[in-house]
Amino acid sequence: AMLIISSVMTSYVNYLVASKFANRFKIKIKAHEGLGYFSFPKTFMVAMAVMLLISYLMSAMKINVNAIQLNLFLIMFAAMYLQGIAVIKMYLINRQMSKNLQNLMIGMVVFMSLFVFAGATILIALLGLVDLTVDLRKLNRIV
């Protein structure tokens, strides 16, 4: 978890520094679109499935892989939860709500799903899984 958090923070700092240099040299950088346009690549699910398959094959060889499998499931669940939050954010954007109201609603959804109603966390993760397989938001259209 610390590796993931530090890599996300490093990527963000790298983006900020690169943006400053690009502006100085008059290079156009595509602006960050926001959480509503975030999506994992289609290959993410394939890669996670392959890793799970390898871990199951290792368990068939009498190797204890419980910790590995648990971590893979947690990573997949967290990724699908984030994808589900992105779907909800896109829905709020399409409803043309103000930014402050969108952020408040997303904050409430995250708070309620994590601390009040744990079943909502599973529903949001399932929403993310459906979006990744069916492309509910139509982000990956071929133009």
Image (tube, rainbow, N blue to C red):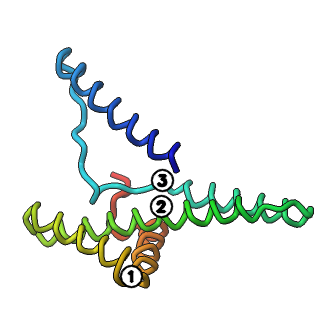
Kind of residue at badge 3 = Pro
From this view, report whether residue 32 is shown above or below residue 141.
Answer: above
Q: Position of residue 58 (x, y in %)?
A: 84, 59
Neighbour tally class for label 2: few under 14, some 14-19, many 20 plus, Cα within 10 Å? some
Under circle 2, the secondary element is helix
Task: From the viewer's perspective, tell me whether residue 92 is left or right of residue 140.
Answer: left
The spot of residue 110 in percent (x, y) is 31, 70
Q: CA distance from mark 2 to mark 1?
A: 15 Å
Residue at 84% x, 64% y is 59
Q: Which residue is mark 2?
A: 79
Residue 20 picture quarter: top left
Q: CA distance from mark 1 to mark 3?
A: 24 Å
Image marks 1 and 3: residues in contact by CB distance under 8 Å: no
Q: Nearer the viewer, residue 12 or 30?
A: 12
Q: What x and y, as percent, mark residue 116?
A: 34, 82
Above or below for 105 versus 6: below
**Tag in front: 3 or 2:** 2
- Amino acid under label 2? Ala
